[in-house]
């Protein structure tokens, strides 16, 4: 549990992370960073996620419409699961739930300003069957606008 330090005195290394799955750790870290706000600052959240979680992170920039949303950063887990580099690509052409099930869950996370989790499977560019878990966490700027979604992604190959 966090001690009685004020939020401005708390550093990322002081957070407790008892959740073993990366999705749970990401959600907990996001919640601790946001303190009493609806969602945390993007730079502070990325700094926190770079401490031991950078391989599992992907970042989507929210554009004016679904067609403009782009993947701007990606860790090795997501890249390996896809069997290609998605950076710079439209989110709607990359996210497995959009392709396989027609879901646009990342937009819901941005509009509701709340985390959205996703679990499913897809076939990657190398023909492997991938089982995955992900969560998208809204982050933004001082104006209270969601500018990006930071995702945590983990997977395993079906054998």
Image (cartoon, grey):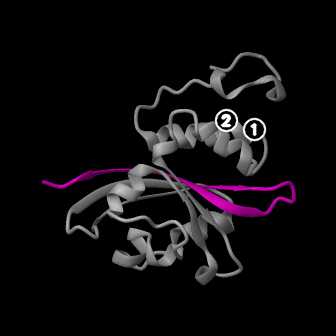
Query: Magenta segment range?
Result: 137-159
Quadrant the C terminus occupies: bottom left
Front position in the image: 44 or 10: 44
In this picture, residue 33 sits left or right of residue 54: right
> Which dot marks residue 124?
none
> Residue at horizontal 76%, vertical 48%?
41
**Alpha carbon separation for disc pair 2 and 1:** 6 Å
Check if residue 146 falls in the magenta segment: yes
Q: Residue pushed farthest left?
A: 159
> Which dot marks residue 35?
1
* Dominant SS in magenta: strand
Give percent across and percent down for residue 10. Answer: 75, 24
Give percent across and percent down for residue 57. Answer: 51, 50
Residue 20's image quarter?
top left
Q: Residue pushed farthest right?
A: 143
- From what the image shows, is residue 74 above or below residue 96? above
- From what the image shows, is residue 29 above or below residue 11? below
Q: Are marks 2 and 1 in contact (CB under 8 Å)?
A: yes
- From what the image shows, is residue 61 above or below residue 12? below
Give percent across and percent down for residue 87. Answer: 52, 66
> Residue at horizontal 39%, vertical 50%?
77
Q: Which residue is mark 2?
A: 32
Front position in the image: 24 or 47: 47
Q: How many marks?
A: 2
Give percent across and percent down for residue 52. Answer: 51, 33
Tell me, yes or no, if residue 39 can be seen here: no
In this picture, residue 143 sits left or right of residue 80: right
């Amino acid at each position: 549990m966090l001690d009685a330090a004020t939020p401005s005195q708390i550093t990322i290394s002081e957070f407790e992370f008892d959740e073993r799955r990366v999705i749970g750790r990401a959600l907990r870290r996001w919640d601790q960073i946001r303190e009493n706000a609806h969602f945390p600052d993007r730079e502070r959240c990325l700094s926190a996620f770079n401490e031991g979680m950078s391989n599992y992170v992907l970042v989507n920039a929210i554009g004016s419409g679904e067609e403009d949303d782009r993947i701007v950063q990606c860790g090795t887990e997501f890249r390996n699961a896809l069997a290609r580099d998605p950076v710079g690509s439209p989110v709607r052409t990359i996210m497995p739930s959009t392709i396989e099930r027609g879901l646009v869950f990342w937009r819901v996370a941005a509009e509701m300003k709340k985390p959205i989790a996703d679990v499913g499977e897809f076939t990657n560019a190398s023909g492997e069957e991938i089982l995955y878990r992900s969560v998208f966490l809204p982050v933004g700027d001082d104006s209270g606008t969601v500018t990006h979604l930071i995702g945590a992604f983990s997977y395993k190959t079906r054998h």
